[in-house]
Each structure stands twice: as C-alpha cells, then as structure tokens.
Amino acid sequence: MKVLGHKIELLTGLLLQEVTMAGLHELRFTEEKPLLRGQDTELEHSDTFLSAVDTDWKEHDIETPYGLLHVVIRGSPKGNRPAILTYHDVGLNHKLCFNTFFNFEDMQEITKHFVVCHVDAPGQQAGASQFPQGYQFPSMDQLAAMLPSVVQHFGFKYVIGIGVGAGAYVLAKFALIFPDLVEGLVLMNIDPNGKGWIDWAATKLSGLTSSLPDTVLSHLFSQEELVSNTELVQSYRQQIGSVVNQYNLQLFWNMYNSRRDLDINRPGTVPNAKTLRCPVMLVVGDNAPAEDGVVECNSKLDPVSTTFLKMADSGGLPQVTQPGKLTEAFKYFLQGMGYIAYLKDRRLSGGAVPSASMTRLARSRTASLTSASSVDGSRPRACTHSESSEAMGQINHTMEVSC
C-alpha cells in the first residue's frame, strides 16, 4: 500500500507539473498576428509562434543559377511576416559574423518572432570543400541573383536583410534588382564604390606583403584595433585562417575587390535616379575602415527612408563589439516599419509573462521611422498607445550612439 500510495503521489505530481508547464507555454508564446497590408487595423490573434522544434537550426544546400548556396534556417514562414535574411562579410561566414549578435538575449526576444535565414557565400561555410582550379567565383551581381532561389525555396514573401561589408553590398544589389522581395535593409560597413586602379594596385601589393588573414583583417578592423592587437583581433586572425577555406576565401576577396559602383543616386540629383525603395538603416563604427564608404552611401540614398547610425567605441565590427546597442537600434527600425515590440520586464511579475509581442500594424496607423521629415529635420517614429511619445522621442536622420 505504501508503494501504491507513492506511485499515485508521483503521478499526481507529474500531472500537475504537465498542466502547469502547458499553462506557462500558452501564456509565454501567444502573440498578436501581423496584419496584411490594407487590412483593417483591428488586431487579430494568432496561434503560437515558433515551437521548441522549430527553433533548431537546419542546414540546406540550395541550387541556384550560379551554383549551390549553403543556408541555415530557424523556424518556418508565418503568414505575411517577412523573414530575416543575413549575408556576412568577406573573410567570415554566418557564424563568425553574426553569432554574437543573434545570440544576444534581447535580440533573441525579437528574432524568435521571425524565421531567420543565414546565407553563406559560396564556399565560405565551415568545412566547405575547396573549389577546383579554374573555378569562376560568381560576380557580386551574380551573388545577388542567387538569393531569389533562397526566397523561393522557403516560400518567403519578402525579407528584411541584414548585411555586413561585402554582404551589405550583395543585399543592396539584391534590393535594386528585386525590390518587391525586400521589406527593409540593415547595411553595416557598406562601401558603394568600386575599386579604382590605384586601390586595385594597393590591394595587389598588400597581398604580396601580407598573409590573406592579415589582409582581410585590415578590411574588418580599424587601425586602432589592429595596432592594439586586441583579443578580438587575435581571435579573428586565428579563425579566418583556420575556419574558412583559404583558396575559396581568396576567390571571394578578389571578386569583392573587383566590384563596380552600386548604381544608386539620391532622387532628384540625376534624371531617372535609381535608389533603394525600402527603408534602410546604415550602420558603421566610429573610425571603422568603412566609415567613409557608409557616409557616401548615405549621401546617395533617399533621406526620407534612410537612417544613419554611427556607433561610438564599436570598432570595425559593431555587431560583435556592441550587440546591445545594435539590437536597440534594430528594434526601433522594426517599429518604424510597423513591427512593434512590447518588451515586458520579467522583474515586475512573480509569474510568467509574455516576453515580447510583435504586432504588424497598418501603415496608416503608424508614424513610421521612414516617414517624411519635418522642417527641423527630425522625423516622428512609430508610437502606440502602450508607449509614450515622451519616452520614445524622435529619431533624426543620423544617430550617433555612445556607450
């Protein structure tokens, strides 16, 4: 009888635990469903977002017109919600470029509401086979033209792109060629200019006097960081030399340095000017190697739909050195496009509370981050009844973030 009583008590405890966990799961994972464009602004409720199984990263090799692309993805498309699609810089892969940023706790609160898709440039993923002698690496235009195959393969309606350096250039090209597939862009360290013959000669000379990892490091990090030889620089020197296949990396490096100017001009400056039609957030670290290029890119984009974020004390890789500041800026960027994040403080409740809720509002109900500027140059940003305008303030075209 004592054994039977113990079994009944154990089963009762397990049942109560299961019921409790089910309640917590329902409470923590419910969210409001994003609205389709043009729908009435009354919010609808959705089912749960990503389940525990969906949060696992899955690898895919996708056929494209210019060869295979290695992609890792978490989650599956949800209604009309865009996917977050990333593209890394030359010398890196998706892990080296984005792991610190996407593993940051506050960033995870945001991204768990979206399918996330990391794209590796051909042959740059860890463990990639070396390309055969004579292999023609895709041009920058062709790298951009490979992405619609990824979008089609997974059934994305459109994407929010996050690119760094060479990856930012690829995503900008992608948005110029396929504007209907891009909802917004976060472009870090982008250089819209092709290499002149003097730059080309300097790159060739550098390749003769420096190892490939050291040559790439001068593209990724500021001179101050390189001279200081910080632990971060030492770590990336080792990983660039060991994780990425050096022959494949050389092909990507050569192609990036053979790029042409991005065909963009600020509307009104030249007849039939081409520009990015989606909201854009440009990001660069103070004194980063790409600072001049990003400033010039900002001068070529539509100021109505562009935000320029210069981050102090972040060096050449702001997504690695300042993931918290970048996450905050990304949250505001999403809010400006109508994706509102209600982040609740767990410390205010003794029980489980919804960690975040992403809501898609009709554009007519929000004052977007990309809406028209006022006379004094400031722009209203999205604000709902749950957040005061005093707390949120106004966002200027150029934000300089100090840490």
Image: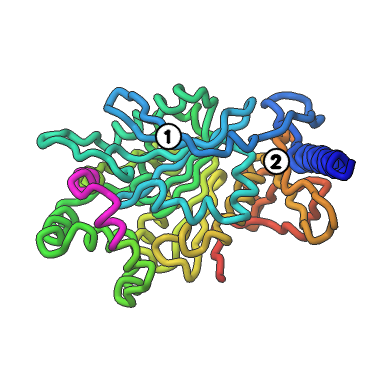
Instruction: Using the rendered view, name the quadrant where residue 384 is placed.
Output: top right
Please tell me which residue lies in front, 374 or 173. Answer: 173
The structure residue drawn at horizontal position 70% and vertical position 32%, both measured from the top left corner, is 34
Q: Residue at x 44, y 40 (%)?
A: 118
At label 1, counting other C-alpha atoms closer than 10 Å, the crowd grade (few under 14, some 14-19, many 20 or more) is few
Q: Where is residue 285 drawn, in percent x and y?
A: 44, 63
Boundaries of the magenta span? 238-252
Earlier sequence position, callout 2 versus callout 1: 1
**Residue 316 seen in the current view:** yes
Q: Residue 313 location, x and y as percent?
A: 48, 71
Q: How many marks?
A: 2
Look at the magenta stretch and give its main secondary structure: helix
Asked if residue 290 lies in the magenta stretch, the reply is no
User: Dot 1 corresponds to which residue?
Assistant: 59
Q: Which residue is mark 2?
A: 358
Circle 1: element type: strand
Callout 2: few (<14), some (14-19), or many (20+) C-alpha neighbours within 10 Å?
Answer: many
Question: CB of mark 2 within 8 Å of CB of mark 1?
Answer: no
Q: Residue furthest bottom?
A: 228
Q: Position of residue 53 (x, y in %)?
A: 59, 34
Which of the image's four quarters has the N terminus? top right
Classify the position of the C terminus by image quarter. bottom right
Q: Which residue type does callout 1 highlight?
A: Glu
Q: CA distance from mark 2 to mark 1?
A: 26 Å
